[in-house]
Image (tube, grey):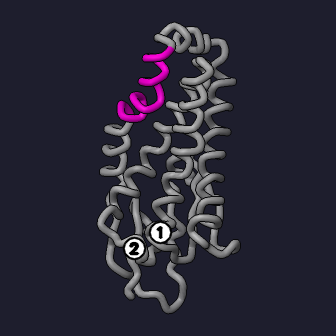
Amino acid sequence: MGEPAGVTAPGQAQGRDASMSVARANLIALVWLPVAALLALGPFVLRWGVSPLAAAIPPPSRLPLVLVVLLASVLLHELVHLVGFLLLGGAPRGSVRLGFNRRSLTPFACCGEPVSAQGYRATALLPALLLGLAPALAATVAGWGALALWSWAMLAVAGGDVAAVWAIRQVPGGALVLDHPARVGCRVLPG
């Protein structure tokens, strides 16, 4: 959900802005990092200590593999958004797409049709829940340090999504919203 569609359907008004600058969203994402660490790693450390985490840190020789896993995980994150738009947002199949921002070298999922603010919020937070919190819980139960670290990375990646939800925090759940074309958040459509 990092990059919106930038398309307003014919006949749709621009609507009220419920967005923030990318710079402000990046600040929120930075503040989110320690929160994500507490959520993903705090319970794990309380249950298992730091040794399994330290043992799971890959050596420098494994850096190429780590980067491939992280890139694939970010793509998976965006695919979860795409599915969220369809299932939780009720978006028509042809209105959602994956793309790639060449400036930031990041994939994104976007929806070119309005969805409810409630559906947008759920879609925004879905990767944090499925790829961050659920694996963190599993890692804490099983004592798997590598999974705990991965879950923290996936929660950290969700920082921009947290910023998007924050940007629309005052929008009623039933209001129709459309991805903002250049900022983090939405336009709230009239009516």
Between 159 and 4, the residue placed more toward the observer is 159
Q: Position of residue 4 (x, y in %)?
A: 50, 64
Q: Position of residue 58 (x, y in %)?
A: 61, 14
Is 38 inside the magenta-drawn segment?
yes
Q: Are marks 1 and 2 in contact (CB under 8 Å)?
A: yes
- Which residue is rendered at x = 29% and y = 66% of the image? 170
Q: Residues within 10 Å of mark 1 (few under 14, many from 20)?
A: many
Q: Position of residue 31 (x, y in %)?
A: 31, 38
From the viewer's perspective, tell me whether residue 71 is left or right of residue 8: right
Q: Helix, strand or loop at disc 1?
A: strand
- Which residue is rendered at x = 55% and y = 31% of the image? 137
Q: Give the residue at mark 1.
A: 179
Which amino acid type is marked by label 1? Asp
- Which residue is rendered at x = 49% and y = 56% of the image? 124
Alpha carbon distance from label 1 to label 2:
6 Å
Quarter of the view holding residue 140 = top right
Establish if 85 lies above or below 175. above
Is 155 inside the magenta-drawn segment?
no
- Which residue is rendered at x = 43% and y = 76% of the image? 174
Q: Give the residue at mark 2.
A: 187
Start-end of magenta stretch? 33-47
Q: Which mark is residue 50?
A: none
From the viewer's perspective, tell me whether residue 4 is left or right of residue 138: left
Total tally of numbered discs in the picture: 2
Q: Main secondary structure of the magenta part?
A: helix
